[in-house]
Image (spheres, rainbow, N blue to C red):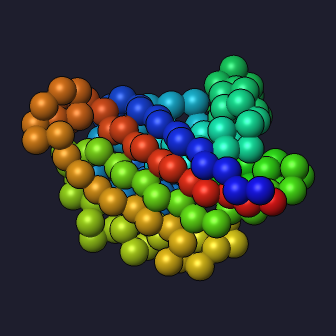
């Protein structure tokens, strides 16, 4: 059985936080605000995977009210998500994702993000597509108030 999943996440940019995207730390003057490390790309991927397996969403499994998830590295959340879907007999076929950010420019970081995420999920890096775009200075992303990410996945039993 093959299933498709879709995920979306957004976090606010604030001073005095590290910027984590795709499992790597990116130097920037602002970071993402959240209960965990607020890696929007990983969170969108987790939601896509959980949705494809009909297992609700990231907030259900990793609530922002839990002290266990406070400050958690999102790579741990992704690894646990892979374990959750595997317990239902699913494996990841591929991921396609897009990060929307005005700054910093993400294209130079994409190969490292692909390697990192592929390693966490046990995939060939070619199975993890990451694209970067801006909103042409429109909306909260364009005003550099936040970053959003979208992801789709294919899983199979």
The x and y percentages for residue 34 are 50, 31
The residue shown at (81%, 60%) is 157
Q: In which quarter of the view is residue 32 placed?
A: top left
Closer to us: 62 or 93: 93
* Residue at 13% across, 31% down: 138
Q: Does 99 sit above or below residue 23?
A: above
Q: Residue furthest top?
A: 65
Residue at figure coordinates x 89%, y 52% from the top left: 87
Report if residue 61 is visible in the image.
yes
Q: Where is residue 67 in the image (x, y as percent from the top left)?
A: 74, 28
Residue sitting nearer the eye, 24 or 121: 121
Residue furthest out toward the left: 137
Tell me which residue sits at (35%, 49%) in the image: 99
Can the viewer see residue 115 in this picture?
A: no
> Is residue 111 positioned above or below 140 on the image?
below
Side (left or right) of 48 relative to 150 = right
Relative image position of residue 10 (x, y in whole percent): 41, 33
- Name which quarter of the figure residue 97 lies in: bottom left
The tally of labels here is: 0
């Amino acid at each position: 059985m093959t299933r498709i999943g879709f995920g979306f996440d957004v976090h606010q940019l604030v001073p005095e936080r590290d910027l984590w995207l795709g499992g790597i730390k990116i130097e920037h003057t602002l970071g993402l605000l959240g209960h965990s490390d607020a890696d929007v790309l990983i969170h969108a991927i987790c939601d896509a995977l959980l949705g494809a397996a009909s297992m609700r969403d990231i907030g259900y499994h990793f609530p922002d009210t839990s002290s266990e998830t406070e400050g958690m590295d999102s790579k741990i959340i992704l690894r646990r998500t892979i374990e959750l879907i595997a317990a239902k007999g699913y494996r990841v076929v591929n991921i396609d994702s897009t990060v929307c950010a005005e700054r910093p420019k993400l294209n130079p970081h994409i190969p490292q993000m692909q390697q990192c995420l592929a390693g966490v999920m046990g995939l060939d890096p070619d199975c993890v597509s990451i694209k970067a775009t801006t909103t042409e200075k429109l909306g909260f992303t364009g005003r550099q108030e936040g970053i959003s990410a979208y992801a789709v996945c294919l899983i199979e039993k």
